[in-house]
Amino acid sequence: KAAMENIIWRRSLQLRSQQQFWQESPEGRKMLEFRRSLPAYKEKDALLMAISQNQVVIISGQTGCGKTTQIPQFILESEIESVRGAQCSIICTQPRRISAISVSERVAAERGEILGETVGYKVRLEGMKGRDTHLLFCTTGILLRRLLVDRNLKGVTHVIVDEIHERGMNEDFLLIVLKDLLPSRPELRLILMSATLDAELFSSFFGGAPMVHIPGFTYPVQTHFLENILEMTGYMLTPDNQIDDYGQEKMWKMNKQAPRKRKSQIASAVEDALRAADFMEYSSQTQESLSCWNPDCIGFNLIEYLLCNICEKERPGAVLVFMTGWDDISSLKEKLQAHPILGDTSRVLLLACHGSMASSEQRLIFDKPEDGVRKIVLATNIAETSITINDVVFVIDCGKAKETSYDALNNTPCLLPSWISKVSAQQRRGRAGRVRPGECYHLYPRCVYDAFAEYQLPEILRTPLQSLCLQIKSLKLGSISEFLSRALQSPEILAVQNAIEYLKIIGALDEKENLTVLGRHLTILPVEPKLGKMLILGAIFNCLDPILTVVAGLSVRDPFLTPLDKKDLAEAAKAQFSRDYSDHLALVRAYEGWKDAERDLGGYDYCWKNFLSAQSMKAIDSLRREFCSLLKDTGLIDSNSYTCNTWSYDEHLVRAVICYGLYPGICSVVHNEKSFSLKTMEDGPVLLYSNSVNTRESKIPYPWLVFNEKIKVNSVFLRDSTAVSDSVLLLFGGSILKGDTVGHLKMLGGYFEFFMKPDIAEMYQSLRRELEELIQN
Ligand code: ADP
Ligand code: MG
């Protein structure tokens, strides 16, 4: 014991002198100066005091005040100063992988270290951490996974849950688990950090835990709503919301450069604005009215016009544009790159910032551009609170974000651009006033802003709960409904029941809601239950290779790109890979082609020609490897055997395994004279997504399609489908691993009877009678 203490003491001393040494170097001094200028630094003592005296502390403070980068460091430094120094282990969770990586890099740089020494990170598929890592930034999912195998978080001294105001599902779940853990770990410290002032909810959840607020400072931000922007273009809104063209002539005359072009540009910007104004006519200050706004109308022209204006007339400073998602960002980026001013790389540095970008790409966002070059960052809501770009002076806010929502009544997930909350709009605006007074352009009228909800609905209340329910079971947290009723805000009972029902149908839970063997395996695989099922069966049936590709492909952003202006070409490119009425098999072929091309030329050319995303292809590649090693860990495949691919070339078998995974995602194909229509039991008529290979067919010689996902937009659309035969559905639909053939047939019977296929219904009826007799005897 004495020797151990000696080692720890020596290591603390070493860490301390390292820091001293760094802080005396010129760069270290500069870093320290920067750190000391952050609002969080002024609260350092108060924060550390609160943390040492309370098991749970809730910290709030404006974005950029130094919560994420400083507070974990304060704790680390104070621990190093104390005797326990080299013993502390601080885990700080981030909702997104990109913030976990970028923050850990930043903190290591502030401490003059390389990543992986004292400070490290761990996200899915990537990590940098060593034996001496005392401060680990990880995604919330990683900590939840660790809890699976290490219930008590042995050795961990501090858990910091960051960005709790976002109310992500993982964070809400983690808070219930940690709350239960606290009594048995009195030494463990839990620190919650939020960018908004809604700390009371969390405080009362933890029995009145103390709250510490970090007062911040921001410069004033001038706010322009749509009506003010319209005025800038020379148009004005008359009191009855008509557009008045007063002043436009004057404005065009003032502009000497290329007046023609300018004129048409303003005209299309105004057109965007006009569409918005159209909307204003029936906006009557209610949430309902917001749904009348066409969400596709993001106003690209208006954004282009504003950016151009800023570049030509405004003082220096970076521009941050909030868009709804990756697709918008890439189309807007393409449009801007073709613009004479905005596309001129000697004047404008155009960057994108979104959750799936590579970590090398994100570093550029923080760099200061050369003098005379204006940085424009097109971002998703990730730049709202988790990433702070220091030199932003102008913000353009489209007012929407892609949000997953879940319609419990129809049991259908939706991914739609929807209006942000007031709090989000304020956050976005606040990004402009960090270094000096700024400007914010909201691309919607004031009255729309007034109708925004105060806060966004927490994720747990708006997404399907299947994976969450499995996790609850595998952590042995008791009854799912009871556990979820203890959440900060509990999900609808119907949504919980739907999830449990689904897990029973796919055979992950038994009738008594206990985890089955299949269910236990599913919790180890970090994919949706249905995809996990596919992997397991692919391994058992020795056709793993194509299944690895299918599952990896369904877990990343769609690798088949469809740029708006080249839609037909892109769809034709995808169709070349199609054979046998399956989007999933098309992906398998596309990936195999890429793999060959990658070996020779890196694969970029191949991706370009075939409208494939090279980034997604690479992600598929590394996910395949991850799944493979997880399957080896579970013992489902041998570590050095190739038998798991004996049947990989049998497309019928692969199709059957896909069916096994996607069941009960199934629709029937109804042929009429020239084409076919589709129906599901729950929704009635449904449509295929336009980029599905099956939309190009006039006939599908199979009676069923299994699909990965259905999404409600205005009708219900199916994404990625594979045609299957009756016999495949009969044998592979349902839960064959459970061995409950009667139950399985009963369920299938429901489908057959619904779709009125008399011959099969009859066949099933007699099969079922036979089986029941057999079992009774
Ligand atoms: P908070 O978590 O309170 O929003 P952070 O701790 O993330 O704030 O950031 C504090 C400050 O550090 C901000 O001013 C931000 O600009 C700066 N910063 C954060 N990450 C980086 C980075 N990778 N490069 C440069 N500056 C950064
Ligand atoms: Mg932060």
Image (cartoon, rainbow, N blue to C red):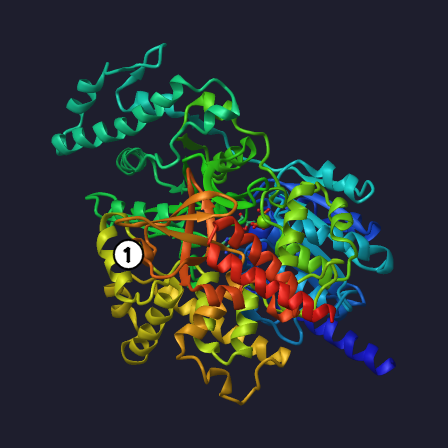
Q: Is residue 118 visible?
A: no
Describe the element under mark 1 as helix, strand or loop: loop
- Residue 108 occupies quadrant: bottom right
Q: Nearer the viewer, residue 672 or 340?
A: 672
Percent from the top left, x then y, of residue 93?
64, 57
Percent from the top left, x then y, of residue 686?
42, 45
Percent from the top left, x then y, of residue 7?
78, 79
Report the side of 659 relative to 768 (left or right). Answer: left
| Mark 1: C-beta under 8 Å from nearest atom of ligand 2 | no
Percent from the top left, x then y, of residue 140?
63, 57
At x 49%, y 37%, the residue is 428
Which quarter of the rendering shows the C terminus? bottom right
Mark 1: amino acid:
Glu
Residue hosting label 1? 697
Q: Nearer the viewer, residue 610 or 406?
A: 406
At x 49%, y 39%, the residue is 431
Q: Is residue 691 visible?
A: yes
At x 62%, y 81%, the residue is 635
Report the side of 489 relative to 599 (left or right). Answer: right
